[in-house]
Image (cartoon, rainbow, N blue to C red):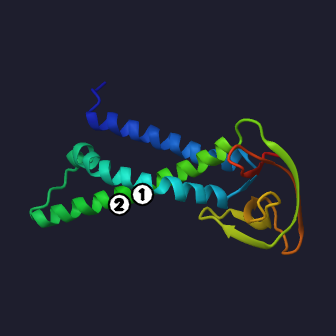
Amino acid sequence: MGRKTPFMHWKSKVTIFLILMAIVIAYPFITIKYFETETPLKITAKYFLGPIVVFLCLFGPKFYFSKIKSLDNFKSKSKSKEKSRDIFAVVMMVLYSSMLFFGLLFSLIIITNTFGTSQTVMIRETVLKYRPEVTRNGKLRHHIEINNPRTHEDIHLEVYREYKQGEIFEKKMKYGLWGILYSKE
């Protein structure tokens, strides 16, 4: 058996990290049948997106030049091409990492919303809008917009069947830790 190179060790850590992030991001979509989507998106965008981007802009270039750049076997003969390639790589790394952490925090808000004691309510509201969405994997998802009886704001729910506009959505749901409606049933 050969000795592992530092690259393989680093690569396996990144792979494990990405798998764990994928599990956390997918978890609420698997375990929670109905949940409000708009509020967690607003919370994540308002309170977490800025710090995520600032953090990645500050530490992303250092990480790139100390960990990733040394693994790059391609060396350009032109310094300007090398610099522009590095700039492009750092920008793309910050962009994709921001999206990944945004998705992670969005899912964590939905997951932590189910912690602690939740107030159970019976929702009986008229469907204001229905929107089908086909994922890139070809799965059909159903989204409805209803009026939140507590805040009287229009909210979006992901549901498991098609609804007609004006139809009554009736479901026993809970307000969780973040005040977001959800139901595991």
Q: Is residue 88 above or below residue 74?
A: below
Badge 2 local density, few (<14 within 10 Å), some, or many (20+)? Answer: few
Query: Tag 2: residue type?
Result: Met
Q: State the image coordinates of residue 121 (x, y, percent, origin top left).
A: 86, 49
**Is 26 left, or right, of 70 in this rendering?**
right
Query: Tag 1: residue type?
Result: Tyr
Q: Is residue 94 above or below residue 65?
A: below
**Is 134 left, or right, of 8 in this rendering?**
right
Q: Quadrant of residue 86?
A: bottom left
Q: State the image coordinates of residue 129 (x, y, percent, origin top left).
A: 77, 73
Local SS, label 2: helix
In whole angstroms, how far apart are the C-alphas of marks 1 and 2? 6 Å
Q: Quadrant of residue 6?
A: top left
Residue plotted at (20% across, 65% down):
84
Q: State the image coordinates of residue 135 (x, y, percent, origin top left).
A: 63, 64
Residue plotted at (29% across, 59% down):
89
**Is 35 left, or right, of 98 in this rendering?**
right
Pointer 1 with pointer 2, Cβ within 8 A: yes
Local SS, label 1: helix
Residue labelled with disc 1: 96
